[in-house]
Amino acid sequence: MSFTELTSFLQAQTELHVLFDTQYRIIAVNQAFRKYCNPGDSVIGRPCYEVSHNYDMPCDRSGETCPLAKSRRSGKPERVLHMHHTPNGEEYVSIELTPIKNLSGEITCYVEKIEPVKMAKGLTERNSLQGQSSAFRKMMELVGKAASADINILLCGESGTGKELVAQAIHRAGKRAARPFIVVDCSGIAESHFESELFGQERGTHPKTGSGKKGLVDAADGGSLFLDEVGDLPLSIQSKLLRLLETGAYRRFGSADLRRADIRIISATSHNLLKKAGDGLFRKDLYYRLDIFPIYVPALRDRLEDIPLLIASLLEIMAPGRNLTVSDEAMYLLQTYRYPGNVRELRNFLERACLLCESREIRPEHLLIPEPEDGENAPPPLPVSPEARLKQLLPAFSGKRKALAKMLGISERTLYRRLSELQEKENR
Ligand SMILES: Nc1ncnc2c1ncn2[C@@H]1O[C@H](COP(=O)(O)OP(=O)(O)OP(=O)(O)O)[C@@H](O)[C@H]1O
């Protein structure tokens, strides 16, 4: 394919596309990319890592996965989830990179398709999902796929891992984003009220007012219904929910009239729902209806490298303008704790620390972290050298040098110098 044919093919694509040479330099971008990123002509000839990440070296040398380097090794198309600088701030994007070969089979350039993943934003947005670990990225890839498919999703994961945030993200990134997102806490509604809460109540049957009442299904019409702890749904309600899922129809409590609702169900459970179904506590037919696309939300102890990033983001929300930093010892304790209560527990530690800390630095005495119960869970020794600290924090802060410098209590210039020294050492 000639260069002209290739660029004309890219222009015809509705998704964002970029063409690179083998030296990471941008050769062409399509109209969709220009419209989204508004980069101006200066983007041509510049390296992709500079345009998308403000890096001065390729992503893999800045602690991130580089799809181009990956594809160069494999010779095949590669997919990664990256955080990019865009006019909307930092955004997760899904990247599919395809090598283009000449007649002799040599790679001459690369085509990159970029799809913004709207649900996970950068450091400063309230209530956004934070994470860059491989467990988190794997989950985010599924979240991106689930959002566009408009199917029922089952989120599995321990309490406090962020299932509700993930559900919101799926809703916000899907085609129902402008419609309601309604949360039903299945463990918090008494069985006697469940039916009227969920499906509404007919006029004349309401004990106090005698008037009719809208249910949560009604309220979610056109949008998403989030069933939190779906395993606690009473069996009597399960059959009614199944009918709604199969036929799109339901009846208000006390009424014989069928009503219709167009909803997407996102459910969450912190228990083994299949086991519950095996024990006869959950309808198997409903389980299979809800479990069309399961997503596992990882426990915080399985993504400990995300902790510095989560801390930076949570502190910015809890104590805006205080510019709090975390001492090495405190950070070490926070990065070696096992978190049975997951991100919710981390947030609680930080909330307490914000109250107890009167200076600008959070230290161990502000954290009130429980002691490990057995010797086996005791944390390994604290890495004390600045280089060891940098290595420890780098994976969690890829693409976020400013935040990393702040967390280490050094200037960006010093951070840059230390990163170059580290790079030189590793290349030796
Ligand atoms: N990845 C994340 N980034 C930022 N904050 C998070 C993340 N995950 C969870 N949180 C925060 O942790 C707290 C618990 O999150 P959430 O309520 O979504 O968890 P959950 O898994 O639904 O818990 P439960 O099962 O107990 O309902 C919230 O304050 C949420 O904002």
Image: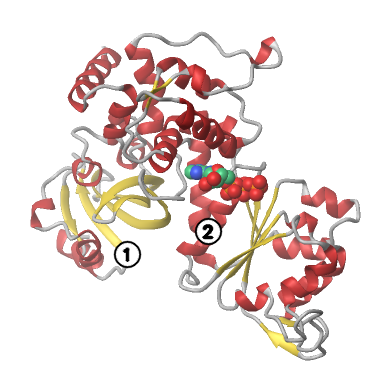
Q: Decide if residue 350 is on the left or right side of residue 239.
A: left
Residue sitting at x 59%, y 30%: 301
- Mark 1–mark 2 contact, CB under 8 Å? no
Crowding at dot 1, Cα within 10 Å, few <14 / some 14-19 / many 20+, comes out as some
Q: Answer left or right for 137 relative to 224.
A: left
Residue 159: image location, x then y, percent: 66, 43
User: Helix or strand or loop: what does disc 1 sit on?
Assistant: loop
> From the viewer's perspective, is residue 393 above or below residue 285?
above
Q: How crowded is mark 2: few (under 14 residues within 10 Å), some or many (20 or more)?
A: many
Percent coordinates x, y for residue 203 in the rendering: 76, 88
Tell me which numbered mark, 1 or 2, is placed earlier along the sequence.
1
Residue 124 shows in this picture = yes
The three-letter amino acid code for the residue at tag 2 is Gln
Whether label 1 lies within 8 Å of ligand 1 gets the answer: no
The circle drawn on residue 168 is 2
Q: Which amino acid does label 1 sit on?
A: Glu
Front residue of 127 and 66: 127
Give me the C-alpha separation between circle 1 and circle 2: 24 Å
Q: What residue sits 29% from the left and 68% below the top?
A: 13
Q: Give the labeled residue for mark 1.
A: 15
Above or below, 304 against 238 in this view is above
Residue at point 88%, 52% (across, down): 278
